[in-house]
Image (cartoon, helix red, strand yellow):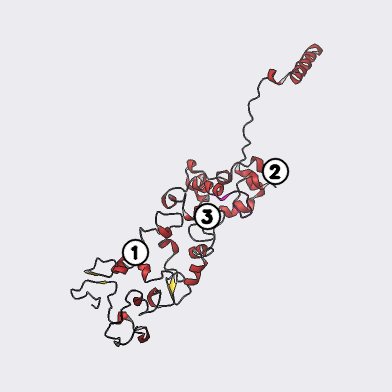
């Protein structure tokens, strides 16, 4: 390049630097700085190593052979450009730990991008969602803890008992559902992600939930016992009781919540109550849930 050409180039560059902004050619916006997953491994090797053993890792292209099902760090955490530039600022990524400034809504949005159908269909507006619960309150995504469903505890009931302490105490009573024995779980009756029914019941009613196991109590019966057909919880405490058969109180007191009249073969006519006799009504009225016997009007057969 000659001296004259060099001078012309310098003058041209100076003119660009001193020109007013509106006279300059508009620069195209710089593309977002996209970090590959290999960049995350540089600092988070241990985390990525634990993640490799989870179900989400198996959804990766190399895990299932489908390139359209790629799950990368950015899928849940967002792009890491700002995090790489300022790793000490927790606001640069969507973090899921308890110290994260991200709201439960933002955390859940990452999960609901994939998990919004099936059992999660009614999550929005559900009891747990309206109380600002995050998916990571119950599920641990980055490393396996439980055998199924990525729970934060080894057992499903231990996850629920983190909040439902009264239910934990009830399972320690004399008679209880076989939670501790591993024969039943909370989700056998409830859908924690939301339902259109009361108490997050998976079935349409309390009785329908009970009938899944206690089909012999479904009926229809020739002689129906109204409180039984109405609601099993009229007499039973489903999570645990200190009385036989998960009853709310001992017989005959349970029965005498409704049957308060005193005229009965076991009651002296002068007595105002028969509580003191401490006899079980079901000694005689054995078919208390209902009877199909032609003479079973009083549930005695």
- Per the rendering, the mark at residue 44 is none
Does residue 150 lie above or below 292 as drawn? above
* Location of residue 278 (image quadrant): bottom left
- Residue ID for mark 2: 86
Label whose residue precedes the other's in the sequence (2 or 3): 2
The reply to whether residue 128 is visible in this rendering is yes
Q: Which residue is mark 1?
A: 207
Contact flag, marks 2 and 3 (Cβ < 8 Å): no
Q: How many marks?
A: 3
- The CA distance from mark 2 to mark 3 is 32 Å
User: How far, Cα to Cα, is label 3 from label 1?
Assistant: 27 Å
Closer to us: mark 2 or mark 3? 3
Question: Which residue is at a point 56% across and 50% down the rendered structure image?
Answer: 104
Element on which disc 3 rests: loop
Residue 295 magenta-drawn? no
Residue 140 seen in the current view: no
Q: Residue at x 40, y 62 (%)?
A: 189
User: Which residue bears the numbered disc 3?
Assistant: 131
> Which callout, 3 or 1, points at the residue further toward the start of the chain?
3
Name the N-terminal-most of marks 1 and 2: 2
């Amino acid at each position: 390049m000659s001296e004259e050409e060099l001078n012309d180039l310098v003058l041209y560059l100076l003119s660009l630097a001193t020109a007013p902004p509106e006279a300059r050619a508009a620069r195209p916006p710089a593309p977002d700085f996209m970090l590959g997953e290999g960049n995350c491994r540089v600092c988070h090797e241990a985390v990525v190593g634990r993640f490799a053993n989870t179900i989400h890792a198996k959804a990766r292209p190399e895990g299932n052979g489908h390139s359209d099902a790629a799950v990368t760090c950015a899928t849940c955490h967002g792009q890491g450009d700002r995090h790489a530039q300022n790793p000490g600022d927790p606001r640069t990524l969507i973090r899921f730990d308890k110290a994260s400034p991200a709201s439960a809504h933002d955390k859940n949005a990452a999960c609901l991008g994939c998990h919004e159908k099936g059992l999660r269909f009614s999550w929005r507006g559900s009891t747990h969602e309206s109380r600002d619960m995050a998916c990571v309150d119950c599920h641990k995504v980055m490393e396996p803890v439980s055998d199924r469903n990525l729970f934060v505890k080894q057992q499903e009931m231990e996850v629920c008992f983190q909040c439902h302490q009264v239910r934990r105490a009830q399972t320690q009573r004399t008679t209880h559902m076989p939670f501790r024995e591993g024969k039943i779980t909370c989700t056998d009756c409830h859908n924690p992600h939301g339902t259109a029914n009361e108490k997050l019941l998976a079935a349409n009613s309390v009785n329908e939930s009970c009938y899944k196991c206690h089909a012999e109590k479904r009926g229809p019966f020739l002689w129906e016992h109204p409180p039984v057909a109405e609601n099993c919880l009229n007499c039973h405490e489903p999570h645990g009781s200190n009385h036989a058969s998960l009853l709310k109180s001992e017989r005959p007191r349970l029965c005498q919540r409704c049957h308060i009249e005193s005229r009965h073969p076991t009651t002296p006519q002068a007595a105002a109550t028969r509580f003191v006799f401490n006899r079980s009504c079901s000694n005689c009225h054995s078919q208390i849930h209902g009877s199909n016997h032609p003479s079973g009007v009083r549930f005695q057969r």
